[in-house]
Image (tube, rainbow, N blue to C red):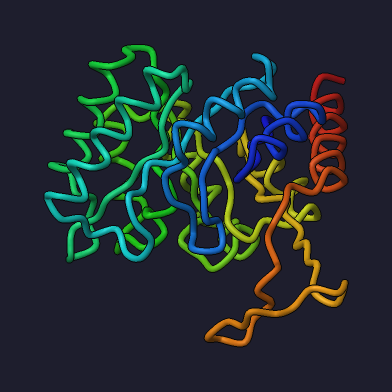
């Protein structure tokens, strides 16, 4: 089983690499579900990981739904080209039709952009699949389209709640595509994911940092939230997840 960490900073990328994660999903604005990271963030993250793990940037031109306009798609095509040329190992994409099916036309355009730029690029379909009307039908389409993996909570609010569907997806995939469990995944869920045949798990492993109350003057926010708060990658969570996976992998070998 492999470990992927969602990170929003070069420092977070360094933490994931130091603690033995296999790859990262690099994005910005994780509090909005994640959007495409900047070229500068990718470059800095590559320096921090120094080749110790794979970097897969999220390609999502805006927050919100996964119903994209022609302008949105054009933006994502450019993002794919620039980030893969910089050295990203793959991209994380997804798009849906209004009826909840995979937007094959958009996906093919994004895939073509990726393969033309970097033929060996890995292709991950993100949790848009969990907003599709039929995740198993969507999975069949993703296999036909040539995706490397799919990130999913099993069409549930959390991966733990979607375990049954995740197990069905693993069986349906038959090794043709990697099923990676993610979305509200707790450390305690990892053994069950392993037992169900999942070959990878995805965690944000985040904690919130705040300087409010340290003499900082609050500038205020519309929703009353802490204006100084931001998220960072929690080293202890990454370390604990890696330890669980190492133990499970070792037990399987024995």
Q: Residue at x 46, y 45 (%)?
A: 169
Side of 253 relative to 173 (left or right): right
Tell me: residue 208, above or below residue 54: below
Q: Nearer the viewer, residue 200 or 164?
A: 200
Tell me the quarter of the picture where residue 74 sits.
top left
Q: Nearer the viewer, residue 151 or 37?
A: 37
Tell me: residue 3, above or below residue 98: above
Tell me: residue 80, above or below residue 49: below
The picture places residue 13, in percent across and down from the top left corner, at 67, 34
Q: Nearer the viewer, residue 47 or 77?
A: 47
The picture places residue 121, in percent across and down from the top left corner, at 39, 19
The picture places residue 31, in percent across and down from the top left corner, at 56, 63
Side of 61 relative to 88 (left or right): left
Q: Residue at x 32, y 50 (%)?
A: 61
Tell me: residue 183, above or below residue 46: below
The picture places residue 171, in percent across and down from the top left corner, at 49, 39
Q: Residue at x 35, y 50 (%)?
A: 136
- Count the marks: 0
Q: Residue at x 73, y 30 (%)?
A: 14
Q: Nearer the viewer, residue 228 or 188?
A: 228
Side of 12 relative to 108 (left or right): right
Side of 106 relative to 80 (left or right): left
Tell me the quarter of the picture where residue 225 sits.
bottom right
Which quarter of the rendering shows the N terminus? top right
Which quarter of the rendering shows the C terminus? top right
């Amino acid at each position: 089983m492999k470990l992927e960490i969602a990170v929003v900073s070069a420092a977070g990328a360094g933490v994931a690499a130091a603690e033995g994660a296999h790859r990262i999903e690099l994005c910005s604005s994780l509090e909005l579900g994640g959007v495409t990271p900047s070229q500068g963030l990718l470059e800095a993250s590559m320096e921090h990981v120094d080749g110790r793990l794979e970097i897969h940037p999220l390609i999502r031109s805006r927050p919100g739904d996964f119903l994209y306009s022609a302008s949105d798609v054009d933006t994502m095509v450019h993002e794919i080209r620039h980030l893969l040329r910089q050295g990203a190992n793959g991209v994380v994409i997804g798009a849906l039709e209004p009826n909840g099916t995979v937007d094959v036309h958009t996906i093919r355009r994004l895939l073509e952009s990726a393969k033309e730029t970097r033929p060996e690029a890995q292709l991950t379909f993100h949790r848009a699949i969990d907003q599709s009307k039929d995740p198993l039908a969507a999975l069949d389409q993703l296999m036909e389209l040539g995706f490397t993996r799919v990130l999913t909570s099993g069409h549930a609010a959390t991966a733990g709640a979607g375990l049954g569907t995740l197990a069905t997806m693993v069986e349906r995939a038959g090794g043709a595509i990697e099923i990676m469990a993610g979305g509200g995944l707790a450390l305690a869920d990892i053994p069950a994911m392993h037992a169900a045949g999942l070959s990878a798990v995805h965690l944000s492993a985040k904690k919130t940092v705040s300087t409010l109350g340290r003499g900082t003057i609050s500038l205020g926010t519309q929703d009353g939230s802490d204006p100084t708060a931001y998220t960072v990658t929690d080293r202890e969570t990454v370390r604990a997840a890696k330890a669980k996976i190492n133990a499970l992998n070792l037990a399987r070998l024995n």
